[in-house]
Image (tube, rainbow, N blue to C red):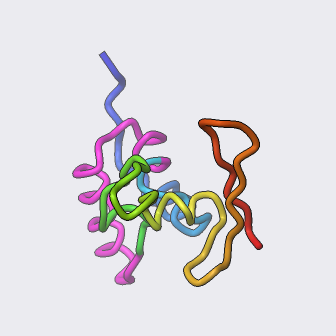
Amino acid sequence: MPKESKFDADLLRKMIVEGKNAVEIADSFNIKKPILNNYLFKLMQLDNKFYKIIGMDYRIKTPKVTKLGLKISLQNMQKFGFEVGENVIIESPEEGSIIIKKK
């Protein structure tokens, strides 16, 4: 049985400031996203300040090929260092694989 995690305002605050995303924070606390949401709300009440955790407002989706092309969530792209509006180069070093690089 996994160890029960307890709310730790200092650790949560530190991880948010470091830019950790929802999955990373939830994993480190050994909790699910709904509990992380409760922790976040509690921290905002304690600090009387708004905090945003990347990935709390939308789900992380697995990239997939659609009729329109490759669909990759913004969060996944940001996780790899890409920002909105950046140009990219897509290469295929071998059949069945692609590499996406900043231009």
Camera-nearest residue between 64 and 32? 64
| Depicted 77 relative to depicted 4: above or below | below
**Residue at 34% over, 74% down:** 44
Comparing 102 with 7, the one in front is 102
Residue 86 x, y percent position in the rendering: 65, 79
How many numbered discs sit on the rendered protein? 0
Taking the spot 50% from the left edge, 64% from the top edge, the residue there is 13
Q: Position of residue 23 (x, y in %)?
A: 43, 48
Q: Is residue 62 magenta?
A: no
Q: What are the residue bounds of the magenta stretch?
A: 24-51
In the image, taking residue 68 as reference, residue 42 lies left or right, namely: left
Q: Quadrant of the N terminus?
A: top left
The residue that appears at 52% across and 54% down in the rendered structure is 11
Q: Residue furthest top?
A: 1
Q: Quadrant of residue 102?
A: bottom right
Q: Position of residue 34 (x, y in %)?
A: 22, 51
Image quarter in which the C terminus is found: bottom right
Q: Quadrant of residue 48?
A: bottom left
* Residue drawn at 32 percent across, 31 percent down: 4
In this picture, residue 9 sits left or right of residue 103:
left
The main secondary structure of the magenta stretch is helix
55 vs 97: above or below: below
Q: Position of residue 89 (x, y in %)?
A: 71, 66
